[in-house]
Image (cartoon, helix red, strand yellow):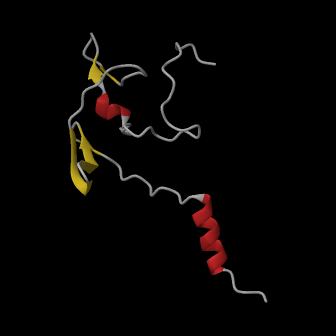
Amino acid sequence: MTDSPPGPEPEGDEMGGMAENELCVDLQALAMPDESDQMQPPAVGDKVQANVEGTVSRIEGDKAYVTMSAVNGQKVAEAAPAPQDEEANLQQMAASQPDRY
């Protein structure tokens, strides 16, 4: 158990997923100077401001989806493709199996 105080409950799903309005950003991209001008990453519950650069990847109705390319001037690593759901995996496996009749 850690000595840090409990933070707000995570908004993602139970498996550690992200909430709909969450961004995944490298901690060092959000680091701010402390009282002695040492760069410190934020802690859970801290308010942050960031300059996000990106490209509009699609538009659906009145919503634009942006693929981030940099946060505060630091390049963002490309996200791994989302895993397929279990049903899609089973269908793919079934389609690749030869018939045994």
In this view of the protein, which residue sits in the foreground, 75 or 38?
75
Please name whichever residue, 41 or 92, is drawn nearer the observer in this view of the structure.
92
Residue at (22% x, 53% y) in the render: 56
Residue, x 54% and y 38% (percent of image)? 13
* Residue 58 position (above or below residue 97): above
Q: Quadrant of residue 50?
A: top left
Q: Position of residue 80 (x, y in %)?
A: 44, 55
Q: Position of residue 75 (x, y in %)?
A: 27, 46
Horizontal side, residue 67 vs residue 92: left or right: left
Horizontal side of 25 relative to 87 (left or right) equals left
Q: Nearer the viewer, residue 39 or 14?
A: 14
Residue lying at the far front in this picture: please name it.
61
State which quarter of the image contains the N terminus.
top right
Residue with the most extreme top position: 35
Res 30 → quadrant: top left
Horizontal placement of 24 versus 88: left or right?
left
Residue appearing at x 77%, y 87% in the figure: 100
x then y, percent, for residue 86: 62, 59
Which residue corresponds to the image point at 58% horizontal and 37% vertical from the top-left?
A: 14
Residue 88's spot in the image, x, y percent? 58, 65
Q: Quadrant of residue 26?
A: top left
Above or below for 59 versus 99: above
